[in-house]
Amino acid sequence: MSPELTTPGSVRPAAEVNEQIRALWLRAGGSLSPQERAEYEHLVIEWAAAIRNRVVEVA
């Protein structure tokens, strides 16, 4: 996995994670390698956690 990924439990803003997801897809040219797929899955989980935290903050 990429060294810039955060450790479990830390939550970056969803927009920041989304930008990293977009950059990954651009670098991959629309087809992810197995390593990129693992990074993508981690980022999506992190993005979902950031969205959940934001909803809790607003509520």
Image: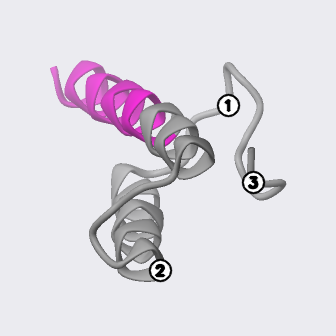
**Dot 2 alpha-carbon crowd within 10 angstroms: few under 14, some 14 to 19, many 20 or more:** few
User: Disc 3 or disc 1, which is closer to the eye?
Assistant: 3
Q: As drawn, is 46 to the left or to the right of 31?
A: right
Q: Looking at the image, is 22 positioned above or below residue 44?
A: below
> Residue at the location (29% across, 34% down)?
54
Q: Looking at the image, is 54 positioned above or below residue 12?
A: above
> How many numbered marks have been drawn onto this rendered protein structure?
3
Q: Amino acid at mark 3?
A: Ser
Q: Secondary structure at mark 1?
A: loop
Q: Amino acid at mark 2?
A: Arg
Q: Earlier in the sequence, mark 1 or mark 2?
A: 1
Residue 2 numbered tag = 3
> Residue at the location (47% across, 42% down)?
37
> Residue at the location (32% across, 29% down)?
48
Measure the alpha-carbon separation of dots 2 and 3: 13 Å
Q: Nearer the viewer, residue 21 or 16?
A: 21
Q: Earlier in the sequence, mark 2 or mark 3?
A: 3
Magenta segment boundaries in residue numbering: 43-59
Tell me the quarter of the picture where residue 47 sits.
Answer: top left
Residue 27 numbered tag = 2
Measure the alpha-carbon separation of dots 3 and 1: 16 Å
Residue of label 1: 10
Q: Secondary structure at mark 3?
A: loop
